[in-house]
Amino acid sequence: MSEIALDQAAGLQQMLAASAGAAPAPMALPKPGHQASSLLDGRNRTPCRAIAVAGGKGGVGKSTVAVNLAMSLSIAGHDVMLLDADMGLANVDVMLGLTPSRHIGHLLDGECTLEELLLPAARGLQVVPAGSGTRRLAQLNNGEHAAIIRAFDELAHPPEYLLVDTAAGLSDNVTMFAAAASEVILVVCDEPASLTDAYGLTKVLNRDFGVRRVRMVANMVRNEGDARLLHQKLARVSDRFLDVVIDFSGWIPHDERLRQAIRRQCAVVDLWPSSHSAQAFKKLAELVDKWAEPDRTALDRIAFFGGRTVPADGVPK
């Protein structure tokens, strides 16, 4: 195992021990000039926007949105990572035709660093794979979730965007990763269960984690009118009962090209860039790139790249 992996493993193990109430083993300080020292030097860090793609209900096309939005941002020239946070039932690698040799479990066991885990995809996109059919990853505790989130603080070269494809449901595996992002995209389709589950997830994020804004994307709809109607239904209830703003952030149409791209294990924005769905993802990526940077100083919860801040003078601290 490399020295860098040992340093990162020590940090992960210390966090896991602390979360379990055990006394952590002393962490060895990096040697002068060691690469790990630059990883821990906040002055060399740059800001990164973490965007969680969630949905509450399974089958709404959440992973499809995450994959194609990440690829659209990468095609536009941005440095993008895509974290498959559906621990135990990962599918991002399958959707992109990738074959990972390692997954998040190897990171937690100290067998590799996050950099060594990165899997290159088309158009410069980098994927952080989770395991599929791995019971242990499906049963991670909150300390292990936190360790994964904190691991991104140690990237020597953080990306401009980190897209986080969350799992379905309301488990800690979903809410911790969503709440740790600077933005949450809520994927909703025209089904009653999709609306109720989306509201349920928004309620948990708002009341338990203090999330004040989510961005809704309507998926598999016929036109913009239908998409805005879905937004109105969800926003009407949330405005009445929750302290959260649900912004309308776009819509993805029904498109046979999108279905064909999924079967071919490719992103539609890469395979058929002129298709209706690809154009919709391109518009979504353009909108995402214009979102104002949220005020992270107000957050009192664990967050991706929580140690990376940029003050008014533009110099990372």
Image (tube, rainbow, N blue to C red):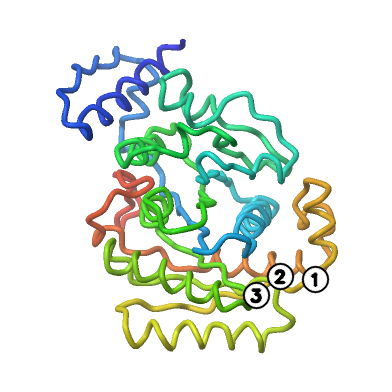
Residue in the image at 55% along x and 72% along y: 194
User: Contact, CB < 8 Å: mark 1 with mark 2?
Assistant: yes
Q: Which mark is residue 251?
A: 3
Question: Where is 210 relative to 64, above or below?
Answer: below
> Circle 3 sits in a helix, a strand or a loop, which is it?
strand
Name the foreground residue: 301 vs 16: 16
Query: Would residue 291 be found to the left or right of residue 38 on screen?
Result: right
Picture coordinates of residue 73, whole percent (x, y):
63, 55
**Which comes before the other along the chain, label 3 or label 1?**
3
Q: Which residue is mark 1?
A: 276
Name the foreground residue: 117 vs 93: 93
User: Contact, CB < 8 Å: mark 2 with mark 3?
Assistant: yes
Question: Where is 128 relative to 217, above or below?
Answer: above
Picture coordinates of residue 11, whole percent (x, y):
30, 25
Q: Which mark is residue 280?
A: 2
Residue 113 visible in the shown view: yes
Query: Would residue 6 be found to the left or right of residue 128 on screen?
Result: left
Corner quadrant of residue 250: bottom right
> Circle 2 sits in a helix, a strand or a loop, which is it?
helix
- Residue type, mark 2 in image: Ala
**Which comes before the other along the chain, label 2 or label 3?**
3
User: How far apart are the alpha carbons under marks 2 and 3?
Assistant: 7 Å
Q: Which mark is residue 128?
A: none
Residue 161 visible in the shown view: no
